[in-house]
Image (cartoon, rainbow, N blue to C red):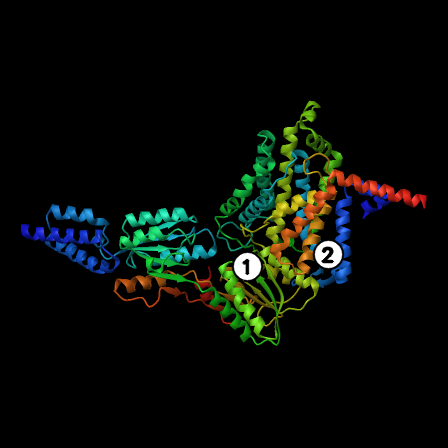
């Protein structure tokens, strides 16, 4: 009896030692060992000594069963509808039912995020999930995480750091979003495309991607013209004024390509004032991005024609990465591009609005 | 128009130069002539129907009346603040966001489906009270604590949009009620945009207040010399404070127009940089930015001139992020023209011209 207890103790302490100095590759093995040890201890109904030892190791992932501990650092969910949806998605995925024990930290400031990361490293989480507020300043803290054997997964935003410091990065491809939208527009088969192009804040990733695809198409095709190309800086009021100005000038147009939903809404307000019909089968095609719920409802009502997604639902991708790493599989790519849809007003359904609306 | 006539009636180019309202009128004529020369269709106004089937006027000039009215309403309050305190309120845009947020919060509540939970007038009055309170806050800082107006209002300029977001729990409520769109659009059957009527109402109330109370005189006295006006029995602290509260009221009206235009709000961009336009309107109106004498009608005209400029630039497809640069050029021009030294030169030149003509 005494001998068995001693063996158990030994197993637990070995597991603990392994944990203290583990590297990411030994993680699964160590987890298995600890689980075994814990099981053994429970089976034996070991004396108070072993139980106490186990209590002390409660911080270790294995001691509390199968739960994988993740520390999630995100931007403030109140920042935008996109972020709110992103955070809700994370909270829905990383639950105890799905085998996770999650801690959350929110900040729009990089230094606060770094502090949170350091705390998570001290708490010895298994994975650190990070949507960085700023691209720089992450090298040393990610190095610490690597030394502690914590796997880092970036979501939504990339950082300026060596690729070796993280397992995977899950991001949107803005260029592809633009291409999907432009291809959809090309499929409409209009004789002539006279486009009012309302851009986001110049230089932002979303603006560059969504503008690039349209610019390329306009340059390539003879029947594609830009009536006007203006930045409304994501601002619906400015978009309204820009479209108003085109209407006042009497120039003909049949497409509004707005780089987000807000600006499309502003443009539509100007159209309504001038009694220019818009939507499915009407005079003007209205295109937006981001898939806000209210925008998808406009699609459902066929007042708009197209809305491109900027996918905030990244948790399932992260889950997949973690499962693969836990199973010891190699990841095919470091950078994982999110699957992003474009919704057409003629095919969108109520379920789509509920599921993809943010 | 009447102003121009009276100026002409009093005769003499020199007189016209010395009149405060000369600057905005000259700017308006300049812009008008420019547009007439380049593309006369700028002045075309056509009557059509909007998507609800009601008659509406459209055209660049109507757009100017429509959007210029927002700045015109703010210019009323901003002129008083400038005259009384010798400084400007830069928190106007942020307070518009707060007022708009209050309106939406009361109209549809949080998590509502967009139907009205309260009459629009109640929501508007609540917004008036809230933005007057914020105006009063600014007023206290400026009048009692004697903080530079720009620095005092910097507090709300920074914090205001966060407060606006907080009022609605960061949600973006959408009003589905049609009536709510009338304030920033058209009232059925009336083809002139509603913001213009709101501006006219505000102007009439202000002019009546200036005519039948001593507000104008007192404001001017305090602005010229606060301590001597105190010795003459005025209360400069109260007058300065009052000007900020009145500006708060103007802000609430603009908040109503802005939220009504799109039936929703975006806290970070609603009425962005509108304070700069309002201040520019005051400057364009020929009012001394250091306080004292003021002319509200000139400021209002100035507001429409700014919108005239903006609309003209949009027409010529000038990138909208370059607009502030053009406005800056106008400011520089104005400051130079309204400098006393230049003004004297101009009127002296006018006199000379007149004499030469008499001789001939």
- Would you say A51 lies left or right of A85 here? left
Q: Callout 1: few (<14), some (14-19), or many (20+) C-alpha neighbours within 10 Å?
A: many
Residue A322 occupies quadrant:
bottom left
Instruction: Tell me residue A197's x, y (percent).
Output: 59, 64
Residue displayed at 81% across by 45% down:
B3
- Would you say A18 lies left or right of B183 here? left
The front one of A309 and B317 is B317
Q: Callout 2: few (<14), some (14-19), or many (20+) C-alpha neighbours within 10 Å?
A: some
Relative height, residue A131 to residue B252 (above, below): below
Residue B206 occupies quadrant:
top right
Contact, CB < 8 Å: mark 1 with mark 2? no
| Secondary element at image label 1 | loop
Relative height, residue A124 to residue B144 (above, below): below
Q: Distance of mark 1 from mark 2, alpha carbons?
A: 27 Å
Relative height, residue A142 to residue A338 (above, below): above
Residues flagged by tags 1 and 2 on a common chain:
no
Q: Chain of mark 2?
A: B
Q: Is residue A238 visible?
A: yes
Instruction: Tell me residue B109's x, y (percent).
Output: 51, 49
Please name the residue that numbered disc 2 is placed on: B61
Instruction: Tell me residue B160's x, y (percent).
Output: 54, 43
Residue displayed at 29% across by 66% down:
A330
The front one of A113 and B160 is A113
Please name the residue that numbered disc 1 is placed on: A200
């Amino acid at each position: 009896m005494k001998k068995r207890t001693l063996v158990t103790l030994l197993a637990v302490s070995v597991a603990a030692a392994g944990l203290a100095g583990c590297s990411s590759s030994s993680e699964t093995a160590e987890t298995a060992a600890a689980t075994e040890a814990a099981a053994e201890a429970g089976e034996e109904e070991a004396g108070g000594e072993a139980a106490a030892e186990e209590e002390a190791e409660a911080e270790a992932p294995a001691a509390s069963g199968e739960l994988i501990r993740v520390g999630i650092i995100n931007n403030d969910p109140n920042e935008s509808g996109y972020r709110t949806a992103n955070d809700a998605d994370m909270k829905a995925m990383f639950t105890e039912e799905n085998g996770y024990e999650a801690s959350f930290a929110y900040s729009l400031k990089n230094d606060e995020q770094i502090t949170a990361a350091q705390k998570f490293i001290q708490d010895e989480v298994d994975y650190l999930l990070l949507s960085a507020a700023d691209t720089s300043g992450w090298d040393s803290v990610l190095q610490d995480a690597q030394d502690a054997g914590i796997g880092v997964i970036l979501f939504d935003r990339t950082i300026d750091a060596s690729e070796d410091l993280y397992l995977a990065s899950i991001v949107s491809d803005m260029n592809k979003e633009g291409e999907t939208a432009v291809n959809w527009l090309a499929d409409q088969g209009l004789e002539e495309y006279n486009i009012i192009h309302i851009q986001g804040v110049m230089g932002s990733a979303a603006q560059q991607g969504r503008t690039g695809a349209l610019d390329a198409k306009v340059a390539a095709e003879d029947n594609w013209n830009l009536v006007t190309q203006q930045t409304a800086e994501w601002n619906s009021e400015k978009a309204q004024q820009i479209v108003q100005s085109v209407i006042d000038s009497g120039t003909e147009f049949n497409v509004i390509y707005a780089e987000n939903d807000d600006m499309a809404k502003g443009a539509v307000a100007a159209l309504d004032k001038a009694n220019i019909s818009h939507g499915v089968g009407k005079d003007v095609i209205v295109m937006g991005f981001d898939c806000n719920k209210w925008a998808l409802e406009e699609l459902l009502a066929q007042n708009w024609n197209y809305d491109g997604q900027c996918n905030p639902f990244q948790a399932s991708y992260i889950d997949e990465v973690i499962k693969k790493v836990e199973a010891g599989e190699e990841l095919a790519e470091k950078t994982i591009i999110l699957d992003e849809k474009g919704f057409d007003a003629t095919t969108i359904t109520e379920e789509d609005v509920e599921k993809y609306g943010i | 128009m009447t102003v121009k006539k009276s100026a002409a009636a009093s005769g003499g180019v020199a007189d016209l130069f010395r009149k405060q309202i000369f600057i905005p009128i000259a700017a308006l004529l300049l812009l008008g002539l420019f547009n007439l020369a380049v593309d006369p269709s700028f002045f075309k106004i056509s009557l059509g129907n909007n998507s609800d089937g009601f008659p509406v006027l459209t055209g660049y000039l109507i757009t100017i009346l429509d959007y210029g009215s927002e700045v015109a309403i703010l210019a009323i309050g901003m002129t008083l603040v400038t005259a009384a305190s010798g400084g400007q309120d830069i928190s106007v845009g942020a307070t518009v966001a707060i007022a708009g947020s209050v309106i939406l919060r009361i109209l549809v509540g949080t998590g509502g489906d967009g139907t009205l939970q309260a009459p629009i007038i109640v929501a508007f009055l609540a917004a008036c009270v809230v933005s007057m309170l914020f105006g009063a806050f600014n007023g206290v800082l400026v009048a009692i604590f004697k903080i530079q107006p720009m620095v005092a209002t910097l507090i709300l300029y920074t914090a205001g949009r966060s407060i606006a977001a907080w009022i609605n729990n960061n949600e973006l409520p959408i009003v589905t009620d049609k009536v709510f769109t009338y304030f920033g659009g058209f009232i059925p059957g009336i083809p002139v945009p509603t913001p213009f009527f709101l501006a006219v109402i505000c102007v009439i109330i202000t002019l009546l207040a200036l005519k039948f109370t001593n507000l104008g005189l007192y404001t001017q006295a305090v602005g010229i010399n606060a301590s001597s006006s105190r010795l003459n029995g005025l209360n400069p602290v109260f007058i300065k404070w009052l000007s900020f509260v009145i500006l708060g009221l103007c802000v609430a009206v603009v908040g109503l127009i802005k939220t009504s235009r799109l039936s929703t709000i975006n806290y970070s961009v609603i009425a962005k940089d509108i304070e700069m336009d309002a201040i520019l309107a005051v400057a364009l109106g020929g009012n001394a930015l250091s306080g004292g004498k003021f002319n509200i009608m000139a400021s209002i005209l100035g507001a429409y001139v700014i919108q005239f400029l903006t609309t003209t630039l949009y027409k010529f497809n000038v990138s909208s992020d370059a607009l502030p640069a053009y406005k800056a050029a106008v400011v520089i021009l104005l400051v130079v023209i309204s400098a006393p030294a230049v003004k004297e030169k101009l009127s002296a030149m006018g006199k000379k011209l007149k004499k030469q003509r008499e001789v001939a």
